[in-house]
Image: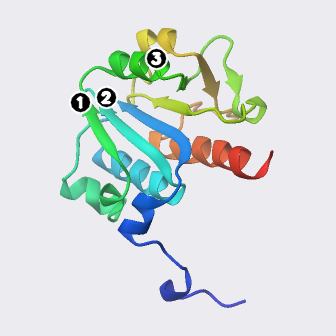
Amino acid sequence: MRKLENSELERKSIEDFKKSEKTPIILILDDVRSLHNIGSVFRTADAFLIEKIYLCGITATPPNKEIHKTALGATDTVAWEHNENVLEVIANLKKENVTTLAIEQVESAIFLQNFKIEKDQKYALVFGNEVHGVSQEAVALCDGCIEIPQLGTKHSLNISVSAGIVVWDLFQKLKWNR
């Protein structure tokens, strides 16, 4: 086995990325404090051709050198928009028939492995603050909630890790499990 060189990876140019058909997933970050988490989510969004990221509340926006440190240029490829009010973003997406899902531990949450993708549906995933998670108001407005099962003592994951896990799971269900 030989490790591939960067030149062998057939990476898209920024222009090709922007022209590419996107995965029908939108990410909403609400009051995410860590600039490294924000950058990591951008990088995950780039990897899976995510449609857009909404940065809400106190979530910082590019350009920012700390976001860039982990995003590694993904802020130039992934479409993003800032909106102070996460509830407004969720309500507007619902009006566009986007299924909105909070990624949170709540009563009646669907465990990630049991979540079924609906064909030809677009999804918006809401990720909350590192300490407080997704607000109760946002949870109540969403169409449902997905929970990542956890078996250890902590029962919480870093937001960028959670985003990577959920995006990968939905991406592979959308692309390969039809």
Circle 1: is it few (<14), some (14-19), or many (20+) Cα within 10 Å?
A: some
Q: How many marks?
A: 3
Provide the secondary structure element on which disc 2 rests.
loop
Q: From the image, tell me which residue sits under label 1.
A: 58
Q: From the image, tell me which residue sits under label 3.
A: 95
Q: Report the side of 23 relative to 117 (left or right).
A: left
Q: Is residue 131 above or below residue 54?
A: above
Q: From the image, tell me which residue sits under label 2.
A: 31
Q: The N terminus appears in which quarter of the rendering? A: bottom right
Circle 3: is it few (<14), some (14-19), or many (20+) Cα within 10 Å?
A: few
The amino acid at mark 2 is Asp
| Residue 56 point in image, percent of width and height | 30, 29
Nearest the viewer among 154 and 116 is 116
Provide the secondary structure element on which disc 3 rests.
helix
Disc nearer the start of the sequence (1/3): 1
| Residue 71 point in image, percent of width and height | 35, 58
Q: Quadrant of residue 84?
A: top left
Residue 83's disc number: none
User: Measuring 44% from the left and 22% from the top, which residue is drawn there?
Assistant: 134
Circle 2: is it few (<14), some (14-19), or many (20+) Cα within 10 Å?
A: many
Q: Report the side of 84 relative to 153 (left or right).
A: left
The amino acid at mark 3 is Lys
The answer to whether the residues at label 2 and label 3 have Cβ atoms under 8 Å apart is no
